[in-house]
Image (cartoon, rainbow, N blue to C red):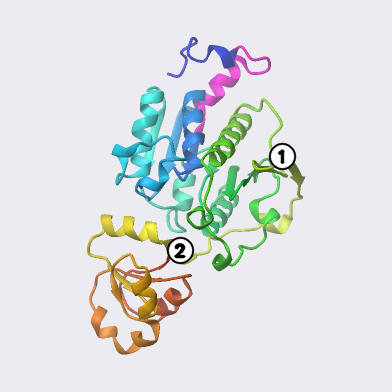
């Protein structure tokens, strides 16, 4: 039981918090989607705040380039599942918390089932497909969710679908073109930024669970750490965005680090780079090179039942390559280089 009075003494003493708020935390079931730059600090502070049940979903393996900002992990964890290692590390921080690892990616096939197991959702994902999937699944399930994002020197967070409040689609009706959305692997990221935003996300979770303060519902908090600017932007609910009743099955575009992770876990996967010869020679992550325009004539080279990942620079040629195999009974994935 998370009732160690001495451990939680300082926050229990807070005016307006007390034993009742601590008990609400102990009874809460929170799912954190993504154990990366945002998820790690959120998880650390939720566990030590006394949240009783925490689920962690992430299909990635830990890599060296994660460590400078994902400080829940260390060098000896490289190559291991983020979700599984996070459970181990959080147990060391707070042995009393009940933790569950979901070491795979959220998808339209599993989202409703997993989200139904929790009271409150935290979206710390790093791509728009997952963010819209989380939104739609939470609307269907009637669950509120805390969501944050970082880019360059800026970050933002809000609480969506809370007490009939606005959803993510009320703020951003449609996903931007993925070809124009660069990740931190391209733009870079200062390690303190996801730490700051992740802490604020944990604070919103605590506020939602305990009702101790003003929740960022219908408000987007933006942060610019380079210019020390904090701004709150209000936005309204669009009733049409509450009418979602099915999940859209988006074809997830993997990043190159996800490809390497997937291959490590599934060594029989065939990686086909459909860029031009010169592009492949300039930079590649392995696999075989069959330029897209040659693929219709070289399909025999990749016949079989093994899963295929088509890779290109932006994902566009990968999608075109995958379309050639839409009638085949095998797993086809698409990916792009970071």
Crowding around mark 2 (Cα neighbors within 10 Å: few <14, some 14 to 19, many 20+) is some
Where residue 77 appears, x then y in whole percent?
31, 39
Q: Quadrant of residue 98?
A: top left
Q: Which residue occupies the foreground of this view, 28 or 78?
A: 78
Q: Could you say whether the residue bearing mark 2 is in a helix, strand or loop?
A: loop
Q: Is residue 19 above or below residue 24?
A: above
- Numbered range of the magenta stretch: 13-29
Disc 1 to disc 2, C-alpha distance: 33 Å
Which disc is residue 252 wearing?
Answer: 2
Quadrant where the C terminus is found in the figure:
bottom left
Q: Which residue occupies the foreground of this view, 241 or 177?
A: 177
Residue drawn at (46%, 46%) of the image: 34
Task: Verify whether residue 188 appears in magenta.
Answer: no
Q: Is residue 183 above or below residue 20?
A: below
Task: Verify whether residue 27 appears in magenta.
Answer: yes
Instruction: Name the N-terminal-most of marks 1 and 2.
Output: 1
Left or right: 116 in relation to 211:
left
Q: Could you say whether the residue bearing mark 1 is in a helix, strand or loop?
A: strand
* Location of mark 1 (residue): 230
């Amino acid at each position: 039981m998370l009732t160690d009075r001495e451990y939680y003494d300082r926050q229990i003493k807070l005016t307006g918090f007390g034993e009742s708020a601590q008990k609400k935390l102990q009874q809460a079931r929170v799912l954190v989607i993504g154990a990366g730059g945002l998820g790690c600090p959120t998880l650390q502070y939720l566990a030590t705040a006394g949240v009783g049940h925490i689920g962690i979903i992430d299909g990635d393996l830990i890599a060296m380039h994660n460590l400078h900002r994902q400080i829940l992990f260390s060098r000896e964890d490289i190559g291991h599942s983020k979700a599984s290692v996070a459970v181990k590390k959080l147990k060391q921080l707070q042995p009393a918390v009940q933790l569950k690892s979901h070491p795979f990616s959220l998808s339209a096939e599993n989202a409703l089932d997993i989200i139904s197991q929790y009271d409150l959702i935290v979206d710390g994902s790093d791509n728009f497909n997952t963010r819209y999937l989380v939104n739609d699944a939470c609307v269907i399930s009637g669950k509120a969710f805390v969501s944050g994002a970082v880019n360059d020197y800026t970050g933002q967070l809000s609480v969506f679908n809370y007490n009939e409040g606005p959803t993510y689609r009320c703020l951003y009706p449609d996903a931007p073109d993925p070809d124009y959305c660069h990740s931190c692997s391209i733009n870079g990221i200062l390690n303190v930024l996801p730490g700051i935003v992740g802490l604020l996300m944990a604070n919103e979770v605590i506020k939602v669970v305990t009702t101790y303060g003003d929740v960022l519902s219908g408000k987007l908090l933006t942060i610019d750490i380079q210019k020390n600017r904090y701004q709150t932007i209000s936005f309204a609910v669009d009733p049409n965005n509450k009418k979602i009743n099915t999940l859209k099955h988006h074809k997830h575009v993997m990043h190159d680090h996800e490809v390497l992770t997937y291959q490590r876990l599934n060594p029989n996967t065939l990686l086909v780079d459909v860029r031009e010869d010169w592009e492949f020679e300039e930079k590649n992550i392995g696999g075989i090179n069959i330029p897209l325009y040659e693929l219709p004539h070289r399909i025999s080279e990749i016949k079989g039942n093994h899963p295929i990942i088509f890779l290109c620079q932006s994902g566009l040629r990968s999608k075109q390559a995958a379309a050639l195999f839409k009638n085949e009974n095998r797993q086809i994935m698409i990916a792009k280089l970071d």
